[in-house]
Amino acid sequence: MKKKILNLFKYLFFFLIGITIFWFIYKDQNIEELKSILKNDVDYKWIWLSLFLGLLSHISRTIRWGYLIETLGHKPRFANSFCAVMVAYFMNLALPRMGEISRCGVMSRYENISFSKLVGTVVVERLIDMVMLLLFVLVIIVAQFGEVLRLLKENPSFQQALIDKVTSPVAIISLVTVVALVFIFRKAFKNTPLYKKAHGFWLNLLEGIQTIRKMEKKGAFIFHSVFIWVMYYLMLYVVFFSFDFTSHLSAIAGLTTFVIAAFGMVAPVQGGIGAWHFMATKALAIYGVAEHNGEIFALVNWSSMNLMILFLGLVATMALPFLNRKKI
């Protein structure tokens, strides 16, 4: 009972943080002006395209999850799998991280599959998703490397300051000290929570890869893993064309905004509220989009994504008993 109260307090605490961030971002927005922009200055056909791409990503995630479940010796109905995925997204809007437990519960109930084994498949999915996000980060680093070099070339004072920081005695001594401490206390470090988490992540990743190796449809699994994240990215990027102030931005600007905003979704708040808006706004500011406009973009993009999840999640929740009425 005490643990449940603590968990409830934790969720409420982070929700309040998200709401507070959201309020600070939008407290100075003129409501009437915002209404006018939403009514007259947004090209909604791109919003509908974004939602369609999001739907494709959800379908693709359902298919990919099915491949993992097949390694357990089960072949679930697509309708149940899709509804379980949408229930997961829907539950995450209420309680962060609760969605994965919910979809495993749905599949365990309606497809008679071991709950613990389903949790294993979800862990593999999450690990693969993390790898995909890191790959997107790598793409940005490589793609933007030329921009960084150009910035340094055009600003020799900044370049010299950076060199001075890196080659300063303080930086060198600090680096040597850190390396020496790690070497001296390496055994003690292995007992720290940070090391155990990192080591556990690595072991789970290896186990997940082993699961994929046993899969019959490896190529299709890899295709859907890439496809899901490409759709996530395009979901955001096409919304750029809904506004005059973002329509000129490049695809790489869209990718950078997507990745930075994605880290906002990692925050333990419902639907990334506040955190996603903040990160997306700051990312757009890198490309010269005024903060006021960035906030409007973030509001429209986030709201459209989550309204779709809310709608599909409610439909899925109501549809499951009817789809399985003979089993109940």
Image (cartoon, helix red, strand yellow):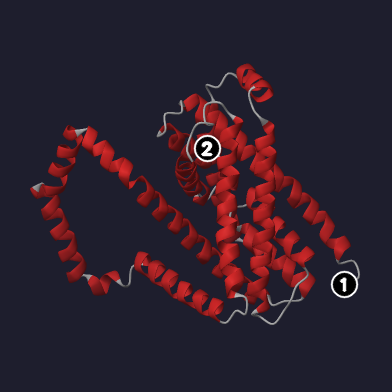
239 or 208, which is in the foreground? 239
Rendered view: 72 above or below 327? below
Which x, y percent locates residue 320? 82, 61
Rendered view: 92 above or below 164? below
* Outermost residue toward the right in this view: 326
Q: Are marks 2 and 1 in contact (CB under 8 Å)?
A: no
At x 46%, y 34%, the residue is: 284
Q: Is residue 109 left or right of residue 181?
A: right
Rendered view: 212 above or below 305? below
Q: Is residue 24 left or right of residue 36?
A: left
Q: Is residue 6 visible?
A: no
At x 44%, y 38%, the residue is: 283
Which x, y percent locates residue 202? 42, 71
Q: Is residue 197 visible?
A: yes
Image quadrant in which the N terminus is located: bottom right
Which x, y percent locates residue 221? 60, 69
Q: Is residue 324 left or right of residue 152?
A: right
Q: Is residue 286 left or right of residue 67?
A: left
Which x, y percent locates residue 266? 50, 51
Mark number, residue 277 = 2
Q: Secondary structure at mark 2?
A: helix
Count neighbours of disc 1 (C-alpha within 10 A) and say few if under 14, some if 14 to 19, many if 20 or more. Answer: few
Disc 2 marks a residue whose amino acid type is His
At x 73%, y 61%, the residue is: 82
Disc 1 marks a residue whose amino acid type is Lys
Of callouts 2 and 1, which one flags the residue occurring earlier in the amino acid sequence?
Answer: 2
Residue of label 1: 327
At x 54%, y 24%, the residue is: 27
235 or 65, which is in the foreground? 235
